[in-house]
Amino acid sequence: MKINRPLSPHLTIYKPQLTSTLSIFHRIAGGFLAFLILSLILCFKLCDLSLSFYEIYLCLFSFLQISDWLFLSLANLALFALCYHMSNGIRHLLWDFGFFLDLPKVYQTGFLVLFSAILLIVLNFLRIYFS
């Protein structure tokens, strides 16, 4: 017997909102950072095992030196993910304490998270450029 109920709405039906978009990107940034840290730990651990793994490590670094743009792009992406994840994490901590939970404040703090992540990236680039 088929019941005539409407299907639940999918992501294609909903209009993207700032809160849902920031939440999705917070999860993506956290997953990316976790994957990056685990892969770096694995890479360093493999270097400790034997000299053959160390040679693979040296080949990888010689490839990264050849393609500096790839390494710098990955480093900049990781830095932006870290700054965004940290800024949004502070916002979530403030929410846990009961601050900024009404809708206008939620949107204001959302824009503040984006601004602070971009500001942290710019300050880091200025620090590198002027040092």
Image: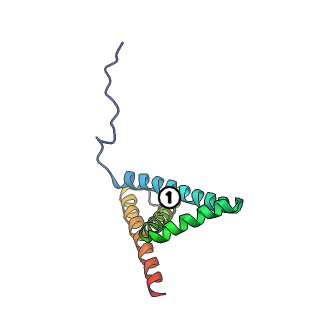
Asked if residue 1 is positioned above or below residue 37 in the image, the reply reads above
Q: Residue furthest bottom?
A: 130
Q: Secondary structure at mark 1?
A: helix
For label 1, the crowd category at 10 Å Cα-Cα, with few meaning under 14, some 14 to 19 and many 20 or more, is: some
User: Can you identify the residue that label 1 sits on?
Assistant: 92
Q: Residue at x 39, y 65 (%)?
A: 114
Q: Depth check: 66 or 27 in front?
A: 66
Q: Residue at x 35, y 55 (%)?
A: 18
Q: Depth check: 95 or 74 in front?
A: 74
User: In which quadrant of the rendered view does residue 69 lie?
Assistant: bottom left
- Tell me: 57 left or right of 118: right
Q: Position of residue 41 (x, y in %)?
A: 63, 60
Q: Residue furthest right?
A: 49
User: In which quadrant of the rendered view does residue 84 lie?
Assistant: bottom left
Q: Residue at x 47, y 53 (%)?
A: 27
In the rendered view, how is the structure colored?
Answer: rainbow
Q: Position of residue 66 (x, y in %)?
A: 46, 70
- What's under tag 1, amino acid-wise? His
Asked if residue 31 is positioned above or below residue 51 in the image, the reply reads above
Q: Depth check: 23 or 32 in front?
A: 32
Q: Position of residue 46 (x, y in %)?
A: 66, 58
Image quarter where the N terminus lies is top left
Q: Residue at x 34, y 16 (%)?
A: 2
Q: Position of residue 19 (x, y in %)?
A: 38, 54
Q: Residue furthest top?
A: 1
Please give the count of numbered marks on the rendered protein: 1
Q: Depth check: 122 or 50 in front?
A: 50
